[in-house]
Amino acid sequence: MRFDLFAPFRPLVRRGVIARIVGRLFPSWLHSPLRRTVQGTALIVFTLLVFWVSWPHDAKPGVVRDGWPATYAANRESKEIVNADAFLALDPLVSTTAALATRAWVWSLAWAGVLLVVSLLAPRGFCGWLCPLGTLCDISDRILARPRIKQDGGWIHTKYYILLVVAVASMFGVLLSGFVAAIPLVTRGLAFSVRPLHVGLILGWREVPPLATSHILAIGLLTAVLAVGVLRPRFWCRHLCPTGALLSIVSTLRLVERKVGPSCTGCGTCVKACSFGAIRPDFKTRTAECTFCQSCGGACPVRAISFAPRWSGIEGKPADINAAEGGALSRRALIGTSVAAMGAALAMPKAGSGATVIRPPGSVGEEDFLALCVRCGACMNACPTSLLQPEGFGSGVLRLWTPRAATTQAGCDPSCNNCGFMCPTGAIRALPLAEKRYVRMGLATVDRQTCLPHAGIKACQLCADVCRDIGYNAIVMDAKADDGRSPADTSFEAPIVDSSKCVGCGYCESQCQDVNVTAGDLAAPAIRVTAGPGREDRIRSGSYRALHTQRAASPASGAATEPAAAGRHAER
């Protein structure tokens, strides 16, 4: 039995004017047309998920559920034929390291498991057929100039050392895969670079958040991954990608592999056709590098190459178990890398250190949040108000690219639950709107020293109006402040926050910023949302709505801040 997926197309692509034109423009397409078609389709689907399904700005108001608007949730659901986080869920490095870091089941492990099982029949097939970053590398390789390096050295094993660092750190509760795994890297880079243009063109450039260092770094990393193709085709995939390294290790259990029959004439066409360096100069197969792309089989003029069960007896040139010309992995380097990764993980600051960050609604406890968040940027890409922004280096390396709620800039729309349904690991719970609307992200507090009516400067009820308009009614105007004292000028009613109703959505703060600070009446918003113990709900499981009802009945009960490992689409 053979698995030569290129064979049925050989007669079709070798004839005709169209084939000749395509052959000049895209010679590799003639070698493996099915693979190139699947690659292109996967890239299109990935692009649609990132730039259409995830983008909420074409949402139309009017959908109501349980007496509340469901504008953005309904918009996403209407477009989500395929889950928007499908590719993130397929990246096996994302789910396995998140599960290791939290010592808990991560919902996307099931999908990663399916991919790994398929990899037994198509070793590293994800890299050669589905990975959108790999396809972008192929495209950029065609564009870039080509002063290629010609010889591999021991450094070709770098991807295995990167994988080892990520795996060891995960065992000590530090998740690093989001920085280097293929799908989070490309999702984050594209979202941070293209979304600001989309927001500016659709909503106006005033709505575009300032470009931060974290944005530039993410875009620069993606650019660098594509740019190193100037050294060699698929340089990132062949030498640096830890996801590819994981799949290479799994390929040692392969059931199907490349076979070279005795009819091989040694013409070298297969070596030129392989962009992964999986074929030695003597035409043997480096099985750890082969991605089952089958371009070599389609290029072979004498049909000496086939893909068949591993133990079939049709081979003239046996496979080579060595990963590359660089020789075997250094045991000393592996031990040194493990020890260094262990030491770095233990030296990392704990989650509780540093300033408190306002997280998206439905986020689990901070320690598990940092151990689950893969910093892919998908939640920020799907946020309709640009409330969610990436953390920078100021809060520590572990918080880099994790989402924070910038409540001075925008509010959390009650008709949206996109962020939870974009999260591939459950760092943000996927909550139905009936639950999400009752999640306390933080708690708003009025600064009586600067608030215009509290200070007796002039009347102002912007915060109360916007809170009433979005349906929370957590701010009321009264002639007495919330501590029972009268304002400086009793002719002004002053805002009072009802902590049992406030969910910390941030609309009050952003409205005060937009009007009072912009007009020059204040230097900073007089009402601020802050998080921390007793001011936010971050529970592992259960109903936020029930918790909210309990708090309304007994305001002294406070907020829940139970650290948690997360579930996922049981609520979807």
Image (cartoon, rainbow, N blue to C red):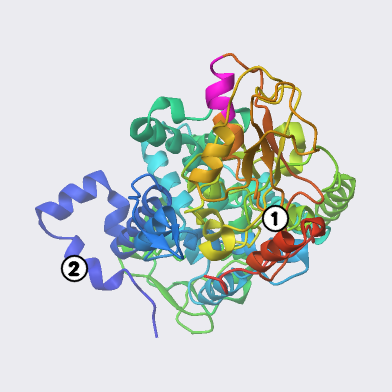
431 on left or right of 69 = right
Q: Please, what secondary structure does the residue beneath circle 2 have?
A: helix
* Residue at which label 2 appears: 11
Quadrant containing the N terminus is bottom left
* Residue 508 on the magenta span: no
Q: Residues within 10 Å of mark 1 (few under 14, many from 20)?
A: many
* Magenta residue span: 512-519
Q: Nearer the viewer, residue 538 or 308?
A: 538
Above/below status of 457 relative to 474 = above
Instruction: Identify the secondary structure beneath mark 1.
Output: helix
Q: Give whichever of discs 1 and 2 has the lower sequence position.
A: 2
Amino acid residing under circle 2: Pro
Farthest top residue in view: 520
Task: Please state the horizontal and vertical placement of residue 507, each as a whole percent of the image.
Answer: 56, 39
Residue 466, percent from left and from top: 52, 39
Q: Is residue 186 visible?
A: no
Label 2: how many Cα within 10 Å (few below 14, some 14–19, many 20+): few
Viewer can see residue 35: yes
Pick the front one: 123 or 347: 347
Q: Is residue 537 left or right of residue 463?
A: right
